[in-house]
Image (spheres, helix red, strand yellow):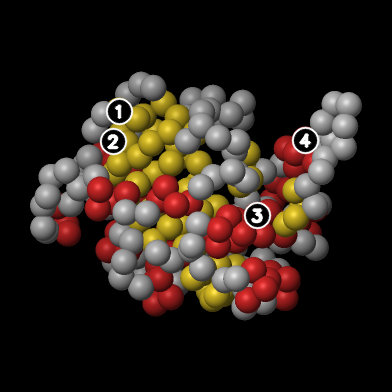
């Protein structure tokens, strides 16, 4: 399995920190956010990684190189202007191949997520056994998390049939998912497109599965959240 890390966002809410540093290179507990992902992916045996970038993308390439020192092989998909998440995937299709791939946001912190759990989730959950790609019920698998304070209403419902746009209970999309490349066939390379829009279309047709991840997870979307992660625990120093 290949993995794609989204790293093209401007990080407006993180300014002024992101004026001179791409958000995925901001450090949490002494290590850039994106390096936490790379090390965890390699630990799970996922070594072929695609990273898209736009804002200050050259700094990302300079910091990570070809990935060799992490035990990975990194390919880059440069975007002159950020193409959003689905647009970024469409732009990088030639690097991702034709098998299901993992994609994750570069600005989340989930140090204990075991990416081995993403292997074969689509094949394992194709309960309908339909051979026609357009009708498959396993086009994507999303990992949801408990709703953080900044997103109390959640994004999707999770029930015994999978991911739904309506219903209870509702949870927040973690930014981690597994996708079939065919989902992005209709998006023209170079055109911006939001992943959430595409996910809602497939969820309405009952074609997305998912589960709730209960481990540590933070959307590092503001300077305050970054500072909270880096604050020493009461009575000690972060090691």
- First reached walking from the N terminus: tag 2 or tag 3: 3
Find the distance from the CA under tag 3 to the CA under tag 4.
17 Å
Residue, disc 3 = 36
- First reached walking from the N terminus: tag 4 or tag 2: 2
- First reached walking from the N terminus: tag 4 or tag 1: 1
Quadrant hosting residue 57: bottom right
Element type at mark 3: helix
Find the distance from the CA under tag 1 to the CA under tag 2.
5 Å
Q: Are marks 1 and 2 in contact (CB under 8 Å)?
A: yes
Q: Is 169 left or right of 154, judged from the image as shown?
A: left
Quadrant hosting residue 93: bottom left
Identify the disc placed on residue 159: 1
Against 163, is 175 above or below?
below
Q: Are marks 2 and 3 in contact (CB under 8 Å)?
A: no
Q: How many marks?
A: 4
Q: Is residue 28 visible?
A: yes
| Badge 3: residue crowd in 10 Å (few <14, some 14–19, many ≥20) | some
Quadrant, the C terminus: top right
Element type at mark 4: helix
Q: Is residue 87 visible?
A: no
Q: Is 154 left or right of 222, judged from the image as shown?
A: left
Q: Residue 144 location, x and y as percent?
A: 45, 37
Q: Nearer the viewer, mark 2 or mark 3?
A: 3
Find the distance from the CA under tag 3 to the CA under tag 1.
31 Å
Identify the disc placed on residue 228: 4
Residue, disc 2 = 162
Find the distance from the CA under tag 2 to the CA under tag 3.
29 Å
Q: Residue 70 location, x and y as percent?
A: 64, 68
Q: Which one is in front, 209 or 67?
A: 67
């Amino acid at each position: 399995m290949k993995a794609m890390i989204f790293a093209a966002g401007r990080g407006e809410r993180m300014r002024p920190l992101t004026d001179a540093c791409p958000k995925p290179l901001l450090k949490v507990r002494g290590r850039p956010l994106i390096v936490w992902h790379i090390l965890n992916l390699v630990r799970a045996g996922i070594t072929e990684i695609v990273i898209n970038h736009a804002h200050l993308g050259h700094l990302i390439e300079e910091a990570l190189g070809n990935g060799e020192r992490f035990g990975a092989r990194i390919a880059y998909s440069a975007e002159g202007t950020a193409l959003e998440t689905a647009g970024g995937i469409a732009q990088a299709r030639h690097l991702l191949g034709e098998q299901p791939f993992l994609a994750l946001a570069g600005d989340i912190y989930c140090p204990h997520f075991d990416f081995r759990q993403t292997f074969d989730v689509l094949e394992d959950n194709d309960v309908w056994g339909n051979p026609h790609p357009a009708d498959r019920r396993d086009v994507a698998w999303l990992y949801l998390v408990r709703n953080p304070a900044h997103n109390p209403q959640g994004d999707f419902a999770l029930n015994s049939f999978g991911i739904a746009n309506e219903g209870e209970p509702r949870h927040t999309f973690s930014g981690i998912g597994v996708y079939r490349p065919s989902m992005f066939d209709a998006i023209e390379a170079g055109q911006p497109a939001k992943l959430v829009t595409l996910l809602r279309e497939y969820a309405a047709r009952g074609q997305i599965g998912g589960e709730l991840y209960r481990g540590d997870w933070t959307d590092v979307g503001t300077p305050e959240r970054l500072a909270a992660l880096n604050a020493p625990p009461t009575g000690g120093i972060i090691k």
